[in-house]
Image (cartoon, rainbow, N blue to C red):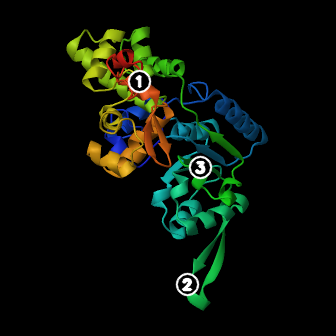
Amino acid sequence: MNWDDTTDPTAAERLVGSVADGEDQAVEAALRPKDLNEFIGQEKVREQLDLVLRAARARGATADHVLLSGAPGLGKTTLSMIIAAEMEAPLRITSGPAIQHAGDLAAILSSLQEGEVLFLDEIHRMSRPAEEMLYMAMEDFRVDVIVGKGPGATAIPLELPPFTLVGATTRAGLLPPPLRDRFGFTAHMEFYEPTELERVVHRSASLLDVGIEADGAAEIAGRSRGTPRIANRLLRRVRDYAQVKADGRITREIAEAALAVYEVDARGLDRLDRAVLEALLKLFGGGPVGLSTLAVAVGEERETVEEVAEPFLVREGLLARTPRGRVATPAAWAHLGLVPPGSPVAGNGQQDLFGA
């Protein structure tokens, strides 16, 4: 259904990672919705974007520049394709890391056709010189190409045809205000509710010609971490299990058994997530503990724990980041079936003997 890309290779290796690998990208191409009516979820964003695009078509003008922010896998790339389709315009796709020099951006902009949609993924990772060139291109539809160096350098103005820039970012806070201000429409993509993900799973199962029961779709949706890309990845793995171990139809029992094989629990935590929680609870009594110490305890790099595992654990209310270190919440103890130190149950009944 609704996805986009990022560049974290560690996350790409996880079944519940929100990064699209080669297999994901190939399957997503077949599953992507083609228009706003097909797009599931993000109701406010769809409504607002529909008004922007319909008004632009009515005026016979190019649409305003659009900035989409949100976590990977929520549909930013898909929406850029829908914008191009709704405006009946060609789509050019590139990314911020690919634009390291102003000349890279100038080459792309100078080859745009009138009305073309330029999708710039991870726009916050673009180089500063290219970023400054983009200001003028977005506002005045022209760029100044510098020819030569030093005192003899000459700026040659290059007029550009009107175009629509769709920028996508997972870190909107890293965008400088002058760049954000040049977007006519800004939208933040929210995580999906389980009921929305059930619709995503049903639609994808239909397109993949997979039989699925309502309770099977609900089980997959509940473990998908609010992200359509993960829902579709889990659906494909459960489909494989159902074809090999059962009659090919996905029920709740089949989904539970399949995801147990792939170590994705009922809350969407995988091996890495549980390893972090278990180390925090069993080795350090729930914390606080420093990030580096926690990373060593689970045998992972500090960056992997901080950027791959922690965001979901924090969002689920299982872990808290404090100035003193990482701390487990009561929900983490409950999820792993452990008893916090100092709990009335933790002393095996001794509190009754001593009145403590």
What x and y, as percent, mark residue 295?
32, 47
Q: Which of 298 and 241 is in front in this view?
A: 298
Query: Which image quarter holds the C terminus?
Result: top left
Query: Is 135 situated above or below 306?
Result: below
Real-space CA distance between mark 1 and mark 3, rounded to the nearest whole angstrom? 42 Å
Q: How many marks?
A: 3
Is disc 1 placed on a helix, strand or loop? loop
**Where, by quadrant of the figure, is residue 155 drawn?**
bottom right
User: In which image quadrant can residue 31 be found?
Assistant: top left
Q: Residues within 10 Å of mark 1 (few under 14, many from 20)?
A: few
Q: Which residue is drawn at 30% across and 35% down?
A: 275
Q: What element carries label 2?
A: loop
Q: Is mark 3 on a helix, strand or loop?
A: helix
Circles 1 and 2 in contact, beta carbons < 8 Å:
no
| Residues packed near mark 2 inside 10 Å, few (<14), some (14 to 19) or many (20 plus) | few
Q: CA gap, disc 2 to disc 3? A: 35 Å
Q: Mark 3 points at which residue?
A: 172
Q: Which mark is residue 148?
A: 2
Q: Which residue lies furthest to the bottom in this view?
A: 151
Dot 1 corresponds to which residue? 343
Residue type of the residue flagged with mark 3: Ala
Mark 3 Cα-neighbour bin, 10 Å: few <14, some 14–19, many ≥20: some
Q: Can residue 327 be seen from the camera position used here?
A: yes
The answer to which of 327 and 276 lies nearer the viewer is: 327
- Foreground residue among 33 and 286: 286
Q: Residue at x 78, y 41 (%)?
A: 59
52 relative to 35, above or below: below
Q: Which of marks 1 and 3 is nearer the N terminus?
A: 3
Between 267 and 326, the residue placed more toward the observer is 326
Kindly report the distance in space between the C-alpha atoms of the residues bearing marks 1 and 2. 73 Å
